[in-house]
Structures are given as C-alpha cells and as structure tokens.
Amino acid sequence: MPALVWTLLGVHIAIIAFNVAGLVLIPLGAWRGWHWVHRFGWRLAHLTILAVVAIQALAGRACFLTLWQFDLAGGSRAPLVARWVNHLLYWPLPLWFFTALYVTTWLYVAFLWWRVPPDLPWRGRTR
C-alpha cells in the first residue's frame, strides 16, 4: 500500500479517536472538575467534526476520508494490519444504521455543549 494510504488511515484513526475520546472525556471532565474540557477551540472542533460526519450521513454519503482511502488504495489487497484496522473501522451494516448513530452522537455532543458549556472567548469562563 502506498505511504499516502497509510498516512490517510492514520489521520482517519486519529480523528475517530479524537471524537470518541471527547464523548467520554467531556462529561467525565465536567464531573471531575477538569477545566480543559471547557476550552472553546477544542469543543468547537469536536462539535464541528461530528456535524460534518452527521451531515454526510444524512446526505447518504460515506465519509470523504473513507472514500479517499479506498480510492488511493486502488482496490489492492491490503496487508494484514490494514485489514484488521479496516474491519474495526468499517462495519458491514446498512447506511441508515450509521446515519442514526452519527446523528444521535452529534445530538449528544450538542447536549454536552449546553450541559458542559465551553468557555466562550467573548464571555470568559462560564463556571
């Protein structure tokens, strides 16, 4: 597999890890009193990235990173590690399942925006 495919796969995994970590760390951090979970830029990136994923799903499109990765791989047989990662990332489920999952996840993040508000730059700390 070309190095660009591996790089794109690494970026994709990092974005997924960022999104999943935020789902857990924001409420945990609010409960534990961690101030960094209120950082505006971090929270805005989390909300925006998940909004892009949800909008793509509602439009009936796969994630653009997924499409790029498959296009760059050119249909070649991936090495074992890449196949394992692909099996973890790409589940053989119908598109409606992912649409419901991504929209529900985004709604949860929007709820966290309200329940664990970020520090808005123009208002200062909200706690």
Image: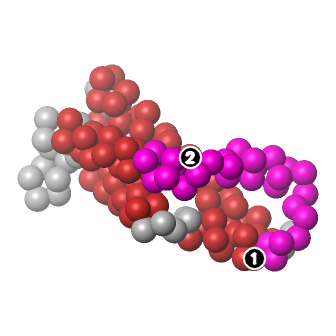
Gap between marks 2 and 1, in whole Å?
Answer: 22 Å
Residue that label 1 marks: 72
Asked if disc 2 and disc 1 are in contact, CB closer than 8 Å, the reply is no
Q: Which picture quadrant has residue 26?
A: top left
Residue 37 position, x and y percent, is 33, 40
Residue 70 location (% of width, % of height)? 73, 70
Q: Is residue 97 left or right of residue 1?
A: left
Q: Is residue 108 left or right of residue 124?
A: right
Residue 96 circle label: none
Label 1 residue SS: helix
N-term mark: 2 or 1: 2
Residue 89 position, x and y percent, is: 67, 49
- Secondary structure of residue under mark 2: helix
Neighbor class of circle 1 (other Cα within 10 Å; few <14, some 14-19, many 20+) is some
Amino acid type indicated by mark 1: Leu
Specify the amino acid type for callout 2: Ala
Find out whether residue 113 is within the magenta segment: no
Which image quarter holds the N terminus?
Answer: bottom right
- At horizontal 41% and vertical 62% (from top left) the residue drawn is 58
Write down the residue under mark 2. 17
